[in-house]
Amino acid sequence: MADFHQNGNIATMHNLRAAPMEAMTHALTTFAQSRKITLILPSLYSELEAPALAQIVKELAEVPYLHRVIVGLDRADEEQYRHAVSYFSALPQHHVVIWNDSPRQKALGERLKGMGLYPAEPGKGKNVWSCLGYLMACQDSDVVAIHDCDITTYHRDMLTRLVYPVANPNFPYQLAKGYYPRIGDGKMNGRVTRLLVSPLLIALKKVIGDRDYIDYLRSFRYPLSGEFAMRTSVLPDLRIPSDWGLEIGVLSEAWRNLAPKSVCQVEIADNYDHKHQDLSPDDAKAGLNRMSTDICKAIFRKLAADGTIFTTHVFRTLKATYYRVALDLLESYYNDAAMNGLTIDRHREEQSIELFAENIMRAGQVFLENPSETPFISTWSRVHAADPDLMRDMLRAVAADYDDLG
């Protein structure tokens, strides 16, 4: 993907392979002397049992510019928490494992519930939100990066390229979004971006007309990537979605809160692969079936907030337009894959498109029936206003969980 194209909406930082990574790492180490950098790893305990995370920890141990690593640990009992603390002890940087299921963390959750501020559902969004709260309570970092724990092609250069645009004091960027090609095992991956988001945005433009927000989302080469870097000054007012619209939700927040020149995307890898979700066509609450519906709802809500009027007729037209656009794009993907020696299962891809088309209608119906529904977790500014002691108590709870380890 070594080109130098700029789309005119957000800046694109390419990998033109003209500078050694050692030079960028050295520069970040220099920047980090006055701009501390923290990495957040939202992790399920099950990911500690997979080889991907072991490789990630091995690579991170060689990163010289990280001030702290925060691991948000979900779905773990006490014994598994103890194992996680030992597992991440290989990291030489300051690091902490937040046991999200500990009695102390649950007690903090009850306090939030009493104020009506507790996240609506567990998951990656809540995990990231909690880690961001802990980071803000520490009050000692200027840059935060987030990436997943299931990246099977991970190399520390990914993190270096991700954080560089927001850590460089000479750059104006407050948020950087990673992008990369999704290929693996001789196949073209990235189904939800290729077969849902890209054709949906094209279809929306055809149906509802030009919208700056649509052009903004279309500017991102991989809008569903889980790799972000941000300056911590934007975090207090960041609204994190609790459902599977996390990545689109964060981009939407950047659109709402930041000037376009403050946002960039950066090429972080020549190849990227991770754990693949099942399509789950028979279960609307699982896999890509659930994910696609949540993504559609996130986009519809944002457009409605910007003044777009949706009706049942609009969603019916959108579904038909999307279906035609998606099939046309599939032809392009198929030919692109063939030219590069990759494979695409056209039957399975068309099955995915059919499911996504149905989910556009499902998401539209949910939106029309409950237009005031909000999946966003309260901002940390609001939490702090409601309970000024909660962030301090979060620090104490994490420290006390560690003390109990003996």
Image (cartoon, helix red, strand yellow):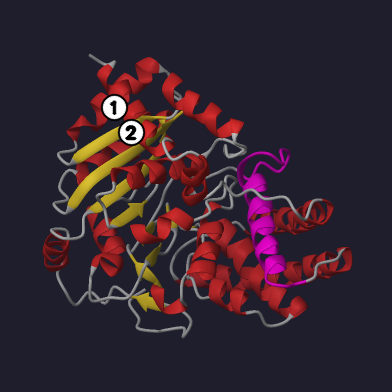
| Image quadrant containing the C terminus | top left
- From the image, give the main secondary structure of the stretch colored magenta: helix
Q: Are marks 1 and 2 in contact (CB under 8 Å)?
A: yes
Q: Nearer the viewer, residue 276 or 219?
A: 219
Q: Position of residue 365 (x, y in %)?
A: 82, 54
| Image quadrant containing the N terminus | bottom left
**Residue at the extreme right:** 313
Q: Which residues are magenta?
A: 279-308
Corner quadrant of residue 268: bottom left
Disc 2: CA contacts within 10 A as few (<14), some (14-19) or many (>=20): some
Q: Is residue 348 visible?
A: yes
Q: Is residue 290 left or right of residue 340?
A: right
Amino acid tagged 1 = Ala
Q: Alpha-carbon distance for marks 1 and 2?
A: 6 Å
Q: Position of residue 381 (x, y in %)?
A: 47, 51
Q: Which mark is residue 399?
A: 1
Figure check: 24 above or below 94: below
Disc 1: CA contacts within 10 A as few (<14), some (14-19) or many (>=20): some
The residue depicted at 70 percent of the width and 63 percent of the height is 300
Q: Nearer the viewer, residue 126 or 106?
A: 106
Determine which residue is flagged by label 2.
395
Label 1 element class: helix
The residue depicted at 48 percent of the width and 38 percent of the height is 387
Corner quadrant of residue 212: bottom right
Q: Is residue 313 left or right of residue 388?
A: right
Corner quadrant of residue 326: bottom right
